[in-house]
Image (spheres, rainbow, N blue to C red):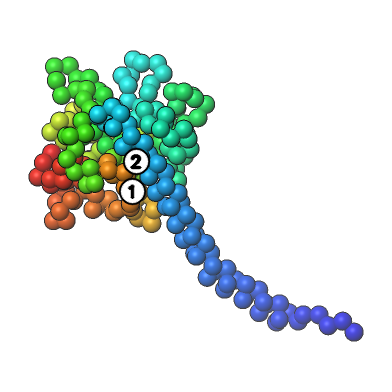
Amino acid sequence: MKKAFTLIELLVVIAIIAILAAILFPVFAQAKVAAKKTASISNLKQIGLAGVMYVTDNEAYPFMSSPSSQTPRTRWPDYLYPYIKNEDVFLAPNADPVIFGKVWAHNPAKKYGGYGYNFQYLGNSRSVAGNANFPFTATETQVSTPAQTIFVADTNGVRRDNNTVGAGEYTLDPPLPSTRGSGKASGYYGEGTECGSGPRGCRSTPAERHAGRVAVQFADGHATTMKLAAMDDFNGDGTLDNGWWNGNADPTSR
C-alpha cells in the first residue's frame, strides 16, 4: 500500500521552504549588489587607465564635451574610447536606465551614461562671453595630487524634484561651485527647469548606488567606493569643501 504525505507533513515542508527562502533571498540580493559593485570598479579602473594615457598623450585632461554647435557632439567618453574600445564600460551598473541618455559620436545606435566627469576642475568646454576662464582643460601639472583628485564617479545627473533627469548624465559637480565656475549662473551644471529646488538643486550629484556608496575613479588611476558625505568633506570637519575635487587636496581652495 502506497503511503502519501499527510497535510501536516506538507505544511511543515512548505514552512521550511518559506523560512529558507526568507533567509536566502537577502543573501542573493547582497551578492547581486556586490557583483555590480565589482563590475563598476572594474569599469572605472579601465576608464582611469584610459584617462592616464589620454593625459600623457595630450598633456591635459579632456574637455567634458565639444561645443554644442558640433555635429556629432563628442564628450569625454568619446575622447577616452580609443584607449578602451568597449562601449559597455561606460554604462554604470545599478544605474537607472533613464541616466543612459547620451549617444556615441562613432555609434549613435548605442548610448552611455551614469558615470560623471569632474568637469569644473578638469575640463569645461563651455564658452562664456567676456569670461576668459572658458573653455579650459587642466594640464597634468595643475593637478598636483592626482591620487586625491576625483576624475570620474557614479552620477545621478541633475535631478528635478520629481526625480526626472534634467541634465548632466555624464558630469559631476563638486559640493561647492568652484571659483573658476561652471559656466552657468547657478554655479553647477544645471540651470532653470533642469534643476530641483534647494541651494544645490542644479548640482550634477554623485550617486550612492552600491550599498550607500559611490564608485569613484581618481586621476592617478585607482578606484574605490566612498560615501557622498566623505567626497564632499575632505578633512572630515562636517563642513562642505572641494578638497577631493580641486586637484590639490586643499579643503580651503575652491
Question: How packed is label 2: few (under 14 Cα within 10 Å), some, or many (20 or more)?
Answer: many
Look at the image and tell me in which quarter the C terminus lies.
top left
Left or right of residue 111, residue 120 in this image: left
Q: Is residue 105 or residue 101 the one in the foreground?
A: 105
Seen as rendered, the residue at the extreme right is: 1
As drawn, 86 above or below 45: above
**Residue 89, disc:** none
All told, the count of numbered labels is: 2
- The N terminus appears in which quarter of the rendering? bottom right
Measure how far apart labels 1 and 2 are at the Cα level.
Answer: 8 Å
Estimate the x, y position of residue 151 in percent, counting from the top left.
28, 40
Q: Which residue is mark 2?
A: 48
Q: Is residue 193 visible?
A: no
Q: Quadrant of residue 67?
A: top left
Whether the residues at callouts 1 and 2 have beta carbons within 8 Å, the answer is yes
Q: Residue 186, percent across and down?
A: 20, 31
Residue 162 vertical position relative to residue 235 in the rendered view, above or below: above
Q: What secondary structure is found at the residue carrying circle 2?
A: helix
Q: Residue furthest front?
A: 57
What's the residue type where badge 2 is placed? Answer: Gly
Residue type indicated by callout 1: Ala
Q: In the rendered view, does 186 fall on the left or right side of 69?
A: left
Q: Is residue 139 visible?
A: yes
Give the residue drawn at x 30%, y 53%.
226
The residue positioned 22% from the left and 19% from the top of the image is 127
Residue in the image at 87% along x and 81% along y: 2
Residue ID at (46%, 61%):
30
Q: Quadrant of residue 119?
A: top left
* Mark 1 residue crowding within 10 angstroms, few (<14) / some (14–19) / many (20+): many
Residue to which mark 1 is pinned: 223
